């Protein structure tokens, strides 16, 4: 697991980012959780991810995004993409052209 020694030699768990209100799961925890379902989390900045992001609508069935310390999913259902951000009142449909532009903007903003 991901642990480090604290000041008194105690192990400190890094499952969440303690600076985030309400707990922000680390990328490592999300990666392991998804692996348990035979899913791979590939960062957009990874060489293979960069290649796939040239046509994100054809690259995968879902994206896990982090924006301002909040994780949310963008998921394809049938032929439609949906923004499943829990901060919204309901899922929002995302068009294929907007999907590419939006994901590119999110990636550029970090």
Image (cartoon, rainbow, N blue to C red):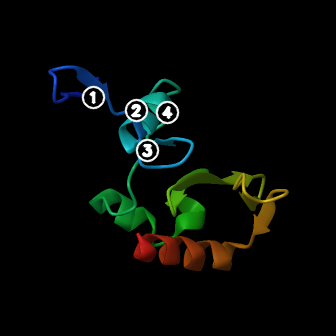
Q: Are marks 1 and 2 in contact (CB under 8 Å)?
A: yes
Identify the residue under disc 4: 34
Q: CA distance from mark 3 to mark 2?
A: 16 Å
Q: Are marks 2 and 4 in contact (CB under 8 Å)?
A: no
Label 2 CA crowd tier, 10 Å (few <14, some 14–19, many 20+):
some
Secondary structure under tag 2 reads loop
Is tag 3's residue or tag 4's residue first in the polypeptide sequence? 4
Is tag 2's residue or tag 4's residue first in the polypeptide sequence? 2
Secondary structure under tag 3 reads loop
x%, y% of residue 28? 36, 38
**Which quarter of the image is occupied by the N terminus?**
top left
Residue 63 marker: none
Identify the residue under disc 3: 41
Residue at point 43%, 44% (across, down): 41
Taking the image as drawn, is residue 61 in sight?
Answer: yes
Q: Are marks 4 and 1 in contact (CB under 8 Å)?
A: no
Q: CA distance from mark 3 to mark 4?
A: 7 Å
Q: Residue furthest right?
A: 90
Q: Are marks 3 and 4 in contact (CB under 8 Å)?
A: yes
Q: Observer-nearest residue: 28 or 34?
A: 28
Is tag 3's residue or tag 1's residue first in the polypeptide sequence? 1
Identify the residue under disc 2: 15
Is tag 1's residue or tag 2's residue first in the polypeptide sequence? 1
Relative to 48, 77 lies left or right: right
Residue 2 marker: 1
């Amino acid at each position: 697991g991901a642990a480090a020694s604290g000041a008194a030699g105690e192990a400190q768990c890094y499952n969440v980012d303690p600076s985030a209100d309400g707990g922000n799961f680390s990328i490592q925890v999300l990666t392991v959780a998804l692996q348990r379902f035979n899913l791979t989390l590939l960062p957009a900045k990874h060489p293979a991810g960069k290649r796939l992001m040239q046509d994100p609508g054809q690259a995968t069935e879902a994206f896990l995004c982090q924006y301002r310390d909040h994780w949310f999913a963008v998921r394809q259902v049938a032929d439609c993409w949906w923004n499943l951000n829990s901060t919204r009142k309901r899922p929002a449909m995302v068009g294929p052209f907007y999907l590419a532009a939006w994901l590119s903007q999110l990636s550029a903003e970090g």
